């Protein structure tokens, strides 16, 4: 039986773009001043266009840019001629064939979801049901001197952001000093969370917590190296309750394992680039919701396309407590506009169908 033209994927385009950064930043293990994303664009027989983006990273997703481009071409060959109505089966097949390429899977998954939402004439979040209409996002301050960190915090405060995420993990003494100075500068109305990027030991995590908890520490993202997950149990429950799994949480299997009581982490950070897209992210979110684990939806340096995709999934999940979706704000350029709405640090979604983004 032939597929009606409006459901048939008739053409696929894949490419990459160096989006560059307007503000380089440093984390516990690396400094970044540019970013390259991969893109997949599909078109149906009736002219519906779906766009998806991925941000491969050897350290985070296990993919080099070269391997990602190669695999994306293979995915494109699978999509051509496919029936968009079978979106879930298509995504499942891609995940089965490319388990080691989550950013590639994410790019395809997002493009398919964008096209499917447009086919139905609805924003993606309305296909699943809105659990939240808007949430504040944090904005990130990389590892810098005290003076630079404070100036950046002031700048973000003036822009209306109410949540700061401070990259830590090099020296507890320096981290505490910067945290303390920023708190003195911004006052108590601004929330401060930290991301150690696996930079601490058990003792250092406890030390940092003890010195910052009374200063209004919101949460600690991935305090220790992912292969030391068992050591998390050495932390007292009150500290583990505000610790968030990031590098330890990539797949649905990880989500199930980490949900076993007593919990290693009280919170999960879902990144579409780690898990392979919207469908996989929503599966992890369902596990978290059942296990009463709070969610943050995070990102890397990414196009508005994938940031918006994560926001749609986040606002549809009852377990979502936090957003960290600032990954497109420091890009020097992008291939789309629109998608999310950002006002005074609060993110929401417009009424556009699919992702609601417009090609430039």
Image (spheres, rainbow, N blue to C red):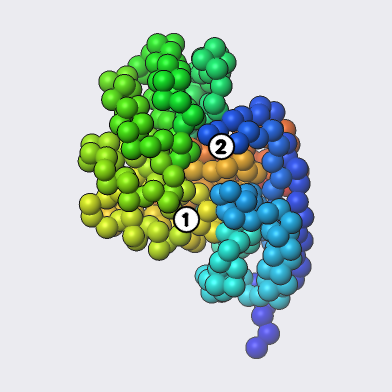
The residue lying at 36 percent from left, 31 percent from top is: 204
Task: Name the residue carrying label 1.
Answer: 250
Q: Quadrant of residue 90?
A: bottom right
If you read the primary sequence from the N terminus, does the residue marked by circle 1 or circle 2 appear first? 2
- Residue 54: give x, y in percent of width and height: 64, 52
The location of residue 151, given as percent across then percent down, is 55, 14
Looking at the rendered structure, the secondary structure element under dot 2 is loop
Dots 1, 2 in contact, CB < 8 A: no
Residue at 43%, 49% (x, y): give it. 226
* Label 1 Cα crowd, 10 Å radius (few <14 / some 14-19 / many 20+): many
Please tell me how many numbered marks the rendered image carries: 2
Q: Can residue 342 be seen at all in this image of the molecule?
A: no
Residue 221 locus on image (x, y percent): 41, 38
Label of residue 300 in the image: none
Can the viewer see residue 258? Answer: yes
The correct choice, above or below, for 207 with respect to 273 in the image is above
Spatial CA distance of label 1 from label 2 is 19 Å
Give the labeled residue for mark 2.
Answer: 29
Quadrant for the N terminus in the image: bottom right
- For label 1, the SS is loop
């Amino acid at each position: 039986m032939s597929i009606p033209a409006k459901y048939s994927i008739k053409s696929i385009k894949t490419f990459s773009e160096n989006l560059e950064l307007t503000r380089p930043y440093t984390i516990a293990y690396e400094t970044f001043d540019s970013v390259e994303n991969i893109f997949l664009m599909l078109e149906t027989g009736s002219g519906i266009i779906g766009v998806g983006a991925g941000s491969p990273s050897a350290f985070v997703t296990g993919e080099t840019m070269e391997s990602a481009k190669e695999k994306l071409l293979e995915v494109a060959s699978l999509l051509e001629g496919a029936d968009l109505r079978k979106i879930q089966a298509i995504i499942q097949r891609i995940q089965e064939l490319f388990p080691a390429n989550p950013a590639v899977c994410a790019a395809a998954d997002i493009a398919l979801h964008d096209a499917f939402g447009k086919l139905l004439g609805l924003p993606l979040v309305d296909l699943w049901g809105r659990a939240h209409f808007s949430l504040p996002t944090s904005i990130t301050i990389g590892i810098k001197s005290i003076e630079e960190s404070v100036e950046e915090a002031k700048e973000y405060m003036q822009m209306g952001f109410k949540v700061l995420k401070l990259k830590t993990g090099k020296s507890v003494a320096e981290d505490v000093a910067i945290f303390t100075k920023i708190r003195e500068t911004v006052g108590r109305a601004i929330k401060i969370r930290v991301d150690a990027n696996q930079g601490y030991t058990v003792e250092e995590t406890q030390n940092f917590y003890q010195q910052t908890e009374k200063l209004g520490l919101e949460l600690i993202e991935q305090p220790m190296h992912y292969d030391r997950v068992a050591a998390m149990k050495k932390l007292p429950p009150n500290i583990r309750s505000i610790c968030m799994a990031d590098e330890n949480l990539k797949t649905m299997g990880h989500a199930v394992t980490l949900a076993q009581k007593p919990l290693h982490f009280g919170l999960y950070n879902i990144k579409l680039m780690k898990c392979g897209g919207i469908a996989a992210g929503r599966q992890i979110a369902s596990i978290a919701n059942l296990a009463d684990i709070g969610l943050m939806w995070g990102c890397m340096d990414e196009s508005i396309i994938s940031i918006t995709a994560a926001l749609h999934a986040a606002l549809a999940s009852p377990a979502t407590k936090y957003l960290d979706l600032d990954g497109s704000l420091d890009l020097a350029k992008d291939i789309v506009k629109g998608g999310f709405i950002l006002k005074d640090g609060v993110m929401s979604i417009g009424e556009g169908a699919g992702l609601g983004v417009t090609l430039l």
